Image: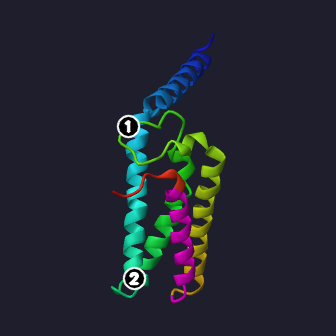
């Protein structure tokens, strides 16, 4: 075998090993997924809370609206991936129905993601007229919380 062929095989083996190691090293534990999920959902809640203050005219931060609506929409696109099998335990407010009624959960999560996308589109057309789409997003979030999240205490 020539030196060049040997080097090529070494590179192939090294790259394959790196890819396998990367997959193993980044395989998330359910506990970590739960923490990540909670952080993402808290982030959405924070953006919704801030946007609520702006939409209701309580504060004037018009330059921040785009940031909030886009952040919400991006996060809402990931919701279904945040509730994998084996992440239905521990300190979480997610109800068992997330996993026992996956089709129903998928329906409401997708509806919330669509509502968030609609809010982004409404904002891109007119920053002054997002109230209706913001309310629709709030209702979509409430629909999901109603059946799939433990009530606030």
Which span is picked out in magenta? Answer: 128-146
Q: Residues within 10 Å of mark 1 (few under 14, many from 20)?
A: few
38 and 65: which is toward the camera: 38
Going from the N terminus, do you reach mark 2 or mark 1 first?
A: 2
Q: Residues within 10 Å of mark 2 (few under 14, many from 20)?
A: some
Q: Main secondary structure of the magenta part?
A: helix
Question: Helix, strand or loop at disc 1?
Answer: loop
What mark, if any, has residue 54 been given in the picture?
A: 2
What mark, if any, has residue 90 been given in the picture?
A: 1
Question: Helix, strand or loop at disc 2?
Answer: helix
* Residue at (49% x, 72% y) in the render: 69
What is the spatial separation of the Cα atoms under label 2 and label 1, in whole angstroms?
Answer: 35 Å
What mark, if any, has residue 139 been given in the picture?
A: none
Q: Position of residue 26 (x, y in %)?
A: 45, 34
Q: In the picture shown, does residue 131 fall above or below 33?
A: below
Q: Is residue 52 left or right of residue 123?
A: left
């Amino acid at each position: 075998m020539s030196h060049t062929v040997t080097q090529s095989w070494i590179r192939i083996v090294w790259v394959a090993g790196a890819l396998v190691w990367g997959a193993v090293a980044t395989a998330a534990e359910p506990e970590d997924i739960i923490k990540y999920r909670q952080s993402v959902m808290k982030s959405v809640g924070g953006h919704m809370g801030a946007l609520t203050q702006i939409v209701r005219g309580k504060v004037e931060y018009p330059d921040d609206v785009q940031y909030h609506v886009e952040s919400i929409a991006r996060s809402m696109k990931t919701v279904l991936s945040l509730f994998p099998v084996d992440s239905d335990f521990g300190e979480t407010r997610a109800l068992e129905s997330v996993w026992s009624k996956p089709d129903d959960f998928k329906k409401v999560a997708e509806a919330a993601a669509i509502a968030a996308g609609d809010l982004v589109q409404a904002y891109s057309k007119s920053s002054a007229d997002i109230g209706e789409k913001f309310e629709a997003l709030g209702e979509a979030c409430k629909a999901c919380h109603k059946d799939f999240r433990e009530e606030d205490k």
